[in-house]
Amino acid sequence: MSALKSGVRGGGFIRAAATLAVLLAGAGAPLAPAAAADIGYVTSQDANTLSFVDLDTMTIEASIAMPGEPAGIAVSRDGTRAYVSQPKAKQIAIVDTAARKIIGEVTVGGGPLGIAVDPSGSPVYVADWYSHTLLLVDPAKRAVIGHFDTGKSPSGIAVSKNGTVVVTADRASNQLSFFAAKTGQVIARVPVGERPFGVAFSPDGARVYAANVGSDSVSVVDARGHFVIRTVPVGSHPYDAVETKGKVFVTDQYGGTVTVFDAGTGKRLDQLDCCDYPEGIAPSSDGRFVYVTNWFANTVEKIDAASLKIVGSVDVPDGPRAFGQFVRAAPAAPAAKMPEAAPKTGG
């Protein structure tokens, strides 16, 4: 779907294979699981793959075939499922993240792009670029079960932490749409900059960030009052924006930069000349790092959120996009038990 692809470029990854490090409290005591690592789920649109990237070591653990020019990515909160939009195939794929294989596909028609999942694991929300709707997919039934009417050409999707509110960036309408997740009722339509693409909630849920491709800016929107707090100038053709550690990081596609500004004041803190057509961006599960996919360089870069330095990089298959929440911490592995000690004999 070349038309959709070029339109998108005017505008994204985490689960881990948990490592089991243990503390032994005594013979027969269970072993405590270590904290889960982060995995990046990277969609590569040109290579038609989904890669599983260990973000601690910045190495690819596995890549699987993902037909249909995969673009959007969402991972369930428990880390067991990943959902991938496939614009050319007009469907979404359901991936078992432990088995690392596609276990289902759902035909949605139109032009599926942005994708997100409710905190409970269902429904999966899919932005349909051509029908101007937000589709609701039941991953168990593997069927579209409803839709919300958005503005024109919805792209990015953000879901509040408690799952009650869903927001779409309506690119061709220059607005954000806020929906009540349970009913589909429109809470608000908020005018923002030109051609908003990526959209994300702040960690505390108080703000929503919209990356405005056409006006080289980010709109900071009050998530409860539904008004624009401020508009922050960034680099050329911003694609997506995320907040972590009190800073907002923005991928500037044409600029080849990541703009960083203060979440509270909008003051620019830096503009990192680090990237080659950066697109998807997501923070680590603990917020210490930010990961950026580079469409032209075919890399994922790791940025320290405190120092704003590049601290790691990994080569990935051609055309990485990773549009959406592509970083997720895996659940810890189940606690293991030590063999019971043999009873003493012989007095």
Image: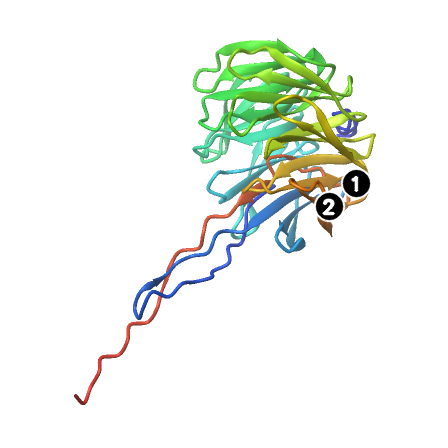
- Name the residue nearer the viewer: 151 or 233: 233
Q: Residue at x 46, y 48 (%)?
A: 331
Disc 2 target residue: 310
Image-quadrant location for residue 250: top right
In the image, what residue type sits under mark 2? Answer: Ile
Report the disc number at residue 274: 1
Badge 2, how many Cα within 10 Å: few under 14, some, many 20+? some
Kind of element beneath mark 1: loop
Total number of numbered discs in the rendering: 2
Find residue 287 and report its horizontal and vertical position in percent.
57, 40
- Name the residue nearer the viewer: 7 or 37: 37
In the image, taking residue 36 as reference, residue 215 lies left or right, namely right
Find residue 37 and report its horizontal and vertical position in percent.
54, 51
**227 to 281, vertically: above or below:** above
**175 to 256, vertically: above or below:** above
In the image, taking residue 47 as reference, residue 282 lies left or right, namely left
Instruction: Measure the C-alpha gap from mark 2 to mark 1.
Output: 8 Å
Kind of element beneath mark 2: strand
Q: Residue at x 32, y 71 (%)?
A: 339
Q: Residue at x 48, y 34 (%)?
A: 139
In the image, taking residue 19 as reference, residue 244 lies left or right, namely right
Find residue 98 and report its horizontal and vertical position in percent.
51, 51
**215 to 61, vertically: above or below:** above
- Residues under numbered marks 2 and 1 in contact, where contact means CB atoms less than 8 Å apart: yes
Let me know if residue 45 appears in the view. Answer: no
Find residue 159 and report its horizontal and vertical position in percent.
52, 26
Mark 2 / mark 1, whichever is N-terminal: 1
Q: Quadrant of the N terminus?
A: top right
In the image, what residue type sits under mark 1? Answer: Cys
